[in-house]
Image: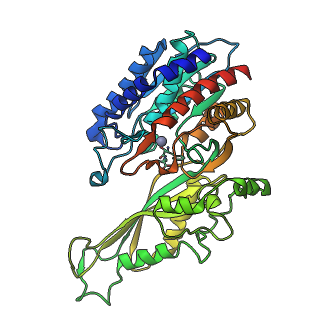
Amino acid sequence: MTAALDYAVQNADVFVDQLKDFLRIPSISTDSVYDADTRRAADWIADDLRSIGIPTVEVMETDGHPIVYAEMGDDPGKPTVLVYGHYDVQPPDPLELWDSPPFEPVEKDGIIYARGACDDKGQVLMHVKATEAYLKTTGELPVNLKFIIEGEEESGSVHLVPFIEQNRELLAADVVMISDTSLFADGVPSITYGLRGLAYVEVTLTGPERDLHSGVYGGGIENPVNALCKMIADLHDENHRVTIEGFYDPVRELSDEEREGFRALPFDEEAWLEEAGAPATKTEAGFSTLEGISARPTLDVNGMWGGYTGEGAKTVLPSQANAKISCRLVPDQMPDDITEKLRRHFEKHVPETMTLDFKDLHGGHAAIVDTKSPAMKAAATAMEAVFGRTPYFTREGGSIPVVADFKRILGLDSVLMGFGLDSDAIHSPNEHFGIDRFHQGIEASIRFLDAYSRQ
Ligand code: BES
Ligand code: ZN
């Protein structure tokens, strides 16, 4: 392992240059204009895996963007690690808020700015470079290693689940390693053991069949924008709890021990609030902010539109009002069940003066992983060696639905060893990744493979 660690230090700058090349490819999976670029990113990472000496590397077709699969080793005496990550990125909009173009990586004060720097190209590459460090020095790996790197994570992973179902043997492993989450704070190591799920819907209320003059008709026809605002306002009560019937029924309550764990975390609420750029916090009554953002379910309007939104005033009584609404879920809420509960709620409350169109956009399951498994212990050993302090076990509010799918389909637990920071602006303008964290991640990956092979 020492030789691999040395190699990583000696090649630190080369690795950063390679990351920049990867970041120059605008692999925006949701936008078909970028289909060729998205494929180019798959080819880029596949070529890199080949060039470091992995014998089997395939760009496997799906009905959407391809999945990059690679493997090395089938020694029955070694455990098998399946590294999962994604080469696709979020759209960079709004472009005008970027200080430099999103696909022209810029290095400033030890930080790389580009779409995908943290989520997830930088973090995927850490594992590839750790593998390279072993192969270029010892010529072998301490474990059997597989990679599955998809191109549709940011657009709902629609083709990934059937791929996993159809390739059970190919993907057989002892554990999944994922770096697509955050550290508790800069320099404060953590391993994530819980992620939230998601239920995402779109609602349209239609009143009059066309937009009407608000003077001629207002007062006699109900306004769908007014009505939708009221319906949405009623989705939370005075304790900031979601009012959908049965919403909390399946929620696994936090144990005293877990709540104690939350209290023990060095959470700087002031700093967090400042970083969020918000004047005050708002959390479900009876729960701390940290619990609210990771271990409690939420309901948020992601966007709302209807009527006239252009410059100046136009007196209009709109025909329609729309909202995109998502719920972050916790165990054991099921996305389909929550979506049905939302549907029933809206159907029950839609005014008689209008019709409702309710669309299920997508969903994903929450996940809690075993913190006591050999792989978790190996990850903790690795993180402790890199940071010089014991990692915390944390829950995070974001979603990686494939974690639950790996468990359900392959019976595999995941180790969520991420190196992002909440402040890395993933999905936002000026996304970035600290070069020091990129190197910490490579070192942690090298150390994890070594520690896990000894368990
Ligand atoms: N890397 C994120 C998820 C994440 C971010 C987890 C920060 C923990 C901390 C991932 O790429 C992502 O954005 N996922 C989506 C999933 C959705 C599209 C199903 C999300 O959480 O919104
Ligand atoms: Zn991601």
Q: Nearer the viewer, residue 304 or 185?
A: 185
**Does residue 170 appear in this view?**
no
**Does residue 97 appear in this view?**
yes
Residue furthest out toward the top:
139
Residue 87: horizontal and vertical position, in percent? 42, 34
Which quarter of the picture shows residue 35? top left
State the count of labels. Answer: 0
- Image quarter (top left, top right, bottom left or bottom right) of the C terminus: top right
Q: Residue at x 46, y 29 (%)?
A: 125
Q: Coloured how?
A: rainbow
Is 97 located above or below residue 61 in the figure? below
Q: Nearer the viewer, residue 175 or 102?
A: 102
Q: Residue at x 38, y 76 (%)?
A: 354
Residue furthest out toward the right:
256
User: Taking 32 as reference, is 448 left or right?
Assistant: right
User: Taking 200 as reference, is 252 left or right?
Assistant: right
Is 350 located above or below residue 144 in the figure? below
Residue 197: horizontal and vertical position, in percent? 57, 50
- Image quarter (top left, top right, bottom left or bottom right) of the N terminus: top right
Which quarter of the picture shows residue 253? bottom right
Which quarter of the picture shows residue 411? top right
Residue 43: horizontal and vertical position, in percent? 36, 24
Residue 44: horizontal and vertical position, in percent? 36, 24
Is 370 located above or below residue 128 in the figure? below
